[in-house]
């Protein structure tokens, strides 16, 4: 047997001996983990719709569309921590807006979003809760209550505060779906404070 042939045979036998051991060392598939790109400015983009405050003039009086179209951008966390517990306390800066298709109150908002995984071991880290807090500017009615136009809420002033929550499920590494609720009011800082409470859903794409 020539020297090249002996080397080839040695390589085949060595590979055959190592392959079973290597296969045994391969770890099982890991649980879901959202992609982490600290150098990315944008963390996630979301779009969706909502029903405008069903219990108020903007949601129950006839003659107007109750549908909102909304979207938001969540930016990367400004601080990263290796500890998942402390990392949950760091929010993502968020900017978004909602357009009412019936010509009633539309708005834009700016604030922070906190995300918390729900029973990560049970749901394989796919179910999560979001909480948002920030400010909102709108084009709704801010005048006297007695002069409120038909189909509008008396919001008192602009800007106001916005709080929101979402229950979500991660479909894949990048895509997720959410059920949402949001409330906007001036916390009693203005003469009138009817506010708005909207219910809807979103789909999100994580970069």
Image (tube, rainbow, N blue to C red):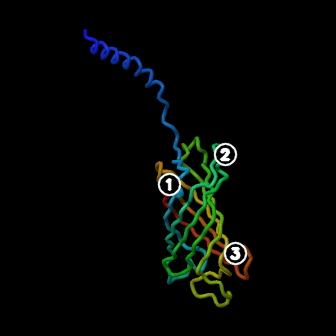
Residue 56 pos. (x, y %): 61, 77
- Residue 191 pos. (x, y %): 73, 82
Specify the farthest residue to the left. Answer: 1
Q: Residue furthest bottom?
A: 147
Tell me the CA gap for discs 1 and 3: 32 Å
Chain-order first, disc 1 or disc 3: 3
| Residue corresponding to mark 2 | 85
- Rendered image quadrant of residue 20: top left
Q: Disc 1, disc 3: CB below 8 Å?
A: no
Residue ranking furthest to the front: 3
Q: Residues within 10 Å of mark 2 (few under 14, many from 20)?
A: few
Closer to us: mark 2 or mark 3?
A: 2
Establish if 5 lies above or below 192. above
Tell me what residue is drawn at x 59 percent, y 44 percent: 120
Q: Nearer the viewer, residue 144 or 64?
A: 144
Q: Residue at the location (69% across, 78% down)?
A: 193
| CB-based contact (under 8 Å), mark 2 and mark 1 | no
25 and 145: which one is in front?
A: 25
**Residue 176 location (% of width, % of height):** 49, 54
Where is mark 3, residue-wise?
186
Residue 3 shown left or right of residue 155 in the figure: left
Q: Nearer the viewer, residue 25 or 68?
A: 25
State the separation of the CA atoms marked 2 and 3: 33 Å
Number of the label disc, if any, that sits on residue 206: 1
């Amino acid at each position: 047997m020539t020297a090249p042939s002996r080397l080839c045979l040695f390589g085949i036998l060595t590979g055959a001996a190592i392959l079973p051991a290597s296969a045994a060392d391969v770890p099982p598939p890991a649980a879901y983990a959202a992609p982490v790109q600290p150098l990315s400015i944008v963390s996630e983009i979301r779009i969706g719709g909502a029903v405008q405050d069903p219990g108020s003039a903007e949601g129950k009086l006839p003659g107007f569309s109750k549908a909102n179209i909304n979207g938001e951008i969540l930016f990367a966390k400004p601080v990263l921590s290796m500890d998942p517990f402390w990392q949950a306390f760091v929010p993502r800066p968020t900017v978004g807006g909602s357009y009412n298709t019936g010509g009633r109150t539309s708005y834009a908002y700016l604030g922070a979003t906190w995300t918390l995984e729900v029973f990560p071991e049970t749901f394989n880290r796919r179910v999560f809760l979001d909480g948002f807090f920030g400010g909102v500017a709108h084009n709704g009615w801010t005048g006297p209550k007695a002069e409120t136009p038909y189909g509008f809420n008396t919001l008192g002033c602009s800007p106001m505060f916005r709080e929101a929550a979402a229950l979500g499920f991660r479909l894949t590494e990048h895509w997720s779906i959410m059920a949402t609720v949001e409330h906007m009011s001036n916390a009693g800082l203005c003469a009138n404070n009817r506010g708005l409470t909207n219910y809807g859903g979103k789909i999100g794409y994580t970069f």
